[in-house]
Amino acid sequence: MSAHFTRRGLTRGITAATAVATLATGLAACGGDSEAATAVSDTAGTVTVGRLSNGAAKETTLKVSEVKSISAELPDAVRKSGKLVIGSGTLPSGSPPLGFVGSDQKTLTGSEADLGRLVAAVLGLEPEVKRFTWENLFVGIDSGKVNAGFSNITDTEERKHKYEFASYRKDDLAFETLKSSKWAFDGDYRALAGKTVSVGAGTNQERILLEWQKRLQSEGKKLTVKYFQDNNSLYLALNSGKIDAYLGPSPNLSYHVTQTASTPDATRIAGHYSGAGEALQGLIAATAKKGSGLAEPLADAINHLIENGQYAKWLAAWHLSDDAVTKSEVDPPGLPLDNS
């Protein structure tokens, strides 16, 4: 999801018609980040995932404790601080099921922060989650305010100039349309000719869509790309026919489809595409500043969770089991520089 490098923040897949969306907008900050209402207290040796999810997840308590051989890999400064600062790029409106304000209308919940908390437990660190707008999440990583971003961040070759990665989930994109629409996407960009599609600015999927737009232009065909500042505006445009489809992260859009199923504005998934292009399976990764020395211990912590079953239970709790990977890798191949 994501090339963050410029422009507006990521438009996320929720709608005003959804109760969860109302909750998710409850903690919109005036600035670029928020440290409020992100703390979750766990009993020693356990991490509870899926708390306050308003039905988006099954609350599950997992046994997990520090693995000394892995925590010994941490950079001295992080180990001595005693905490892992986790960045979530979910301001202002949230991104169910990945990151959003919970049913208490104040606490951050979501699959991404939950994995960050599990990783922190393996590393023997206290998790501290900070919320940012999408673009400010990367500012936080750059400045050292954040140790690692757990926020549906796609591993890309461009980003490797500034960041190091520890992969943890497949990255698949989806097109969402009205349920009444007959349009479908089968992986061939030519299906987009004559269409108007919305995408989040500064995101990985925007790069892919703009590459398709360029190809269509070279063939004398038109693809119109539109941007919206918030989810309400995006879905109003989709419902009114001002756009034909929205391209975004598959987990968000699939969740939104389930929330609209019994409403007059029901939507559906019209097709999928890898977040790394047609020749490579995209990967979502924990993201740290390049040279920080964090990617290796993060990957080892994730692999410990995979090998001992907590990873599978975390995914199952959030209904994301189809996104599972067999292992976490440090800096695996990502979206190519040519976007192909």
Image (tube, rainbow, N blue to C red):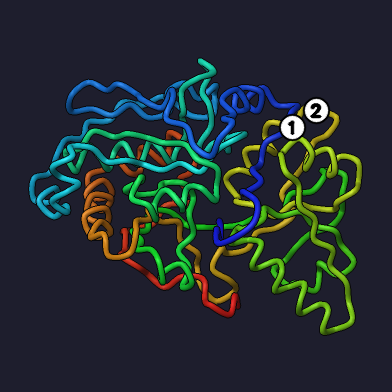
x and y, in percent, of residue 172 in the image = 56, 57
Q: Residue at x 67, y 34 (%)?
A: 258
Report the number of discs.
2
Callout 2: helix, strand or loop? loop
Residue 212 higher or lower than 302, as above or below: below
**Few, some or many C-alpha atoms within 10 Å of disc 1 (few <14, some 14-19, many ≥20)?**
some
x and y, in percent, of residue 296 in the image = 23, 60
x and y, in percent, of residue 161 in the image = 41, 71
Q: Residue at x 67, y 36 (%)?
A: 14
Callout 1: helix, strand or loop? helix
* Residue beneath disc 2: 263
Dot 2 amino acid type: Thr
> Left or right: 320 with respect to 195?
left
Real-space CA distance between mark 1 and mark 2, rounded to the nearest whole angstrom: 5 Å
Residue at the limit of the structure toward the bottom, as seen here: 218
Disc assigned to residue 260: 1
Residue 211 higher or lower than 112, as above or below: below
Badge 1 vs badge 2, beta-carbon distance below 8 Å: yes
**Few, some or many C-alpha atoms within 10 Å of disc 2 (few <14, some 14-19, many ≥20)?**
few
> Left or right: 287 with respect to 16?
left
